Image (cartoon, rainbow, N blue to C red):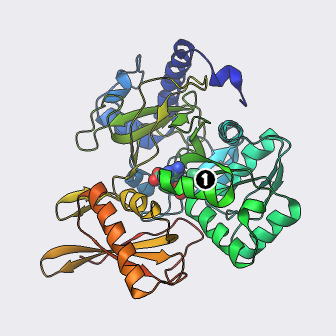
């Protein structure tokens, strides 16, 4: 563990720290950010909260609030205190901008070091970061965390997958990080240039930034012969580093001394019980530059009600199932792209790239799921695979969809987050 004292702290002490920090951060936001003062006053609540229940009275912050006050309207301190700026990759709509003080960067490095160490990173590792170094938070988060641990970092940055692979072989990279779908893309490119990913030195990887199903995880493990960890985070909180999974590979530990987490019913806004699925709401507990109170992440998950066998006392949430704004309603049924991915990834004969197209056929919604085959198949084989995946999707979602197996390398690829859904119904 990177910080065993804090990672294994008793629940009682952890909750004391949380409440103390929660009280301080709400007051800090109230006193220094006009947006929060107005919001809290208008809701007619007292910013001087006394208990965890009191926080429920404070209104939520939404992405729209951040956009309306962008780029610098939510800063709590004068400009000279800030040393770095990042912006969201804009998965849905315009980017959201955040600014960090020196202290905020230190907190980010700390939570990232805990996540990376949980995934096996040590000072002895050669840690390659094939993520764009730019306003996207990914690369810098991994970089600061890796530095804190003392690993040897190779900041290869954006793209050029062939070069990434050659550098892995040249330097003997042992640990990689990145976006989940890119790990599979890299494995494919390696094979194309006759490098077997399993024979490289890479033994550990940590990925996130987009839906990351068990099946995708298993595929990455197999392709690379490495252990794979899931890491979650969002620009509004710091970037990657809010939570990650330990070697139990069953749920992600949220660093509760830095983030206060609630799960709510997205429709009513009420808090819900552990083990019940809902929307994750996060409050930064230690972010001095741009504190965010009760942020509606739109990410769907649930809390585990038991503590983990690994000894860490910080609570776990399930892997993110999807975003409530990614949820698609087809023929009245709610589905998430992650469910389609789960069905596809179970099949041995398909590659990793897929796309879902929603269309109106007459008055009805129709879904076509295009999946790249591992190789070119003849008509009969293709039809068989299509039928098998259609059946699996039906089991998981109850929906009848049309699957089309297409030749390898014919669907668009992305070096950032994958775009899986095209909705042509409107
Ligand atoms: O994607 C931060 C990040 C970078 C996390 C690298 C992990 C690795 P944003 O661009 O602001 O930040 O996007 C945040 O991405 O609200 C989720 O919907 C989604 N997301 C992030 N991590 C995961 C994950 C970065 N492990 C949004 N599983 C979040 C599923 C994830 N979805």
Residue 373, image x, y percentages: 49, 77
Relative to 279, does residue 58 appear above or below in the rendering? above
| Residue at 45%, 33% in the rendered image | 261
- Between residue 199 and residue 266, name the one nearer to us: 199
Relative to 412, does residue 92 appear above or below in the rendering? above
Residue located farthest toward the front when viewing the structure as drawn: 380
Left or right relative to 144: residue 354: left
**In which quarter of the view is residue 92 placed?**
bottom left
Q: Is mark 1 within 8 Å of ligand 1?
A: yes
| Residue at 30%, 36% in the rendered image | 42
Residue located farthest toward the top when viewing the structure as drawn: 12
Residue located farthest toward the bottom when viewing the structure as drawn: 379
Residue 226, image x, y percentages: 68, 51
Judging by the rendered image, the residue that carries numbered circle 1 is 207
**Label 1, residues with CA under 10 Å away: few <14, some 14-19, many ≥20:** many
| Residue at 28%, 29% in the rendered image | 44
């Amino acid at each position: 563990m990177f910080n065993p004292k804090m990672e294994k702290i008793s629940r009682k002490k952890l909750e004391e720290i949380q409440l103390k920090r929660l009280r301080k951060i709400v007051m800090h936001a109230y006193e220094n950010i006009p947006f929060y003062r107005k919001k809290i006053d208008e809701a007619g609540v007292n910013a001087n909260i006394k208990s965890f229940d009191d926080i429920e009275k404070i209104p939520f912050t939404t992405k729209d609030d951040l956009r309306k006050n962008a780029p610098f309207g939510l800063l709590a301190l004068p400009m000279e205190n800030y040393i770095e700026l990042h912006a969201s990759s804009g998965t849905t709509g315009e980017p959201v901008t955040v600014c960090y003080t020196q202290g905020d960067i230190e907190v980010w490095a700390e939570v990232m070091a805990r996540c990376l160490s949980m995934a096996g990173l040590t000072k002895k590792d050669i840690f390659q970061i094939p993520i764009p170094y730019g306003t996207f938070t990914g690369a810098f988060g991994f970089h600061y965390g890796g530095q804190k641990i003392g690993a040897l970092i190779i900041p290869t940055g954006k793209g050029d997958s062939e070069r990434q692979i050659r550098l892995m072989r040249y330097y003997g990279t042992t640990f990689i990080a990145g976006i989940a779908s890119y790990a599979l893309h890299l494995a494919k490119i390696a094979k194309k240039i006759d490098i077997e990913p399993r024979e490289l030195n890479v033994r550990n990887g940590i990925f996130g930034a987009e839906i990351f199903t068990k099946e995708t995880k298993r595929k990455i493990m197999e392709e690379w012969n490495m252990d794979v960890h899931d890491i979650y985070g969002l620009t509004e909180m710091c970037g990657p580093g809010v939570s990650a999974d330990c070697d139990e590979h069953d749920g992600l530990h949220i660093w509760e001394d830095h983030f206060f987490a609630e799960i709510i019913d997205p429709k009513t806004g009420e808090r819900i019980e552990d083990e019940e699925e809902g929307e994750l709401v996060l409050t930064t507990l230690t972010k001095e530059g741009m504190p965010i109170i009760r942020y509606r992440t739109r990410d769907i998950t649930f809390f585990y009600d038991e503590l983990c066998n690994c000894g860490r006392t910080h609570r776990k949430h399930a892997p993110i199932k999807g975003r409530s704004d990614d949820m698609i309603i087809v023929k009245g049924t709610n589905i998430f792209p992650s469910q389609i991915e789960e069905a596809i990834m179970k099949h041995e004969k398909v590659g990793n790239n897929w796309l879902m197209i929603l269309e109106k056929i007459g008055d009805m919604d129709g879904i076509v799921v295009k999946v790249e085959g591992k190789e070119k198949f003849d008509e009969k084989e293709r039809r068989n695979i299509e039928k098998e995946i259609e059946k699996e999707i039906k089991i998981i979602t109850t929906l009848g969809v049309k699957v089309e197996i297409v030749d390898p390398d014919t669907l668009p690829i992305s070096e950032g987050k994958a775009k899986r859904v095209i909705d042509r119904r409107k």
